[in-house]
Amino acid sequence: MNTKSTKTVLPAVAMTAVSMVLTLAVVMMWLGTAVPWPVALVVGLGIDGGWLATLAYERRLAAQGDHNRIVTAVGWSFGLIASGVLVAHALTAEQSAGAWLAVSWLPIAAKALWLVHSLWERTALTTLALDAIWGIQQEARDEAAVARARLRAEATTEETRLAAVTAAGARVARVQAKTAKTLAGAWSTLESARQGEGTGRTLTSVTSPVTPGVTPRWELPVWGPVEPVAALEGPALSDAELDTLVDEIRHSQVPALSYREMATRFRASGHSASEVRLRAAWKRVTAA
């Protein structure tokens, strides 16, 4: 019997001993006046002996892991008989009836304590098993705590990331709106300048020293899609040939074409020359 089982078996033994002593004393006092005292002693010992015998048999079966309902019923019968004797004595006693009636439940209480002890033995576990169970429970608690911490960390990280992405998106949207507003204002100013009455005269006065005797038509760029122009390939022209082509294209129409119109027709006809050489040829032709 280990130390833990004594917590339940000692109260049951004490209660049983008290109950047997009370039962024997009551039988001796109650029946001693009606029958000889040896007879009363035999009756008292018979009740206590039968109760003790059935209890010992129940404990033997419990030690073997077995159970017998008949033995249990007999044991409870002896307990009820002992309680009945105490109750009957208390009801017929002329003095201290209440006190005797108050202790009449002790045999039933003793049987109940033995029942509690048997349940304790059926569910008792060894120290090794208890340690294993405690370890499993502790491991489960640790895993649950780690999982909760991981989830909280991931939630915090995701919240921080979403906040950063939202802030960056807001900054990008503000920059785009500001850029679009600035660009719209610039193109509005450019459109106003393009449609102004004095724009052409101003640009002509600025470029007159470059193109003497020629009145070019100036057009500012228009907001809209741009179509790329394919690169033209052709044999390189000498300066004399370039000057001749520029002069022919310029005077191909009356009045003479501007530099921009001449350059457009020059490239449209399949000729190739850099902008620097073409402008130099224009200056030579117009100066001549």
Image (cartoon, grey):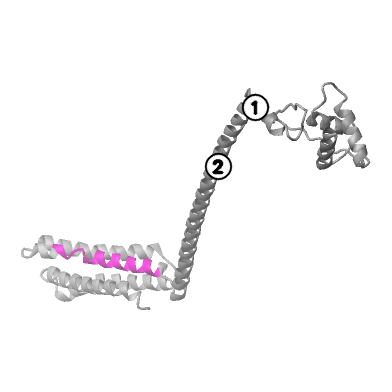
Q: In the structure shown, which secondary structural element does the residue marked by tag 2 occupy?
A: helix
Identify whether 3 is placed above or below 253. below
Our reading of the magenta stretch's main secondary structure is helix
**Side (left or right) of 168 relative to 131:** right
- Residue 175 spot, x, y in % from top left: 55, 42
Q: Residue 283 bears which disc, if any?
A: none
The reply to whether discs 1 and 2 touch (Cβ–Cβ < 8 Å) is: no
Q: CA distance from mark 1 to mark 2?
A: 33 Å
Question: Which one is in front, 110 or 276?
Answer: 276
Mark 1 residue type: Thr
Q: Residue furthest top?
A: 254
Q: Residue 199 bears which disc, if any?
A: 1
Asked if residue 159 shows in the view, the reply is yes
Q: Which residue is mark 2?
A: 175
Mark 2 residue type: Val
Residue 114 among magenta residues: yes
Q: Indicate the quadrant where residue 89 lies.
A: bottom left
- Residue 173 spot, x, y in % from top left: 55, 40
Q: Residues within 10 Å of mark 1 (few under 14, many from 20)?
A: some
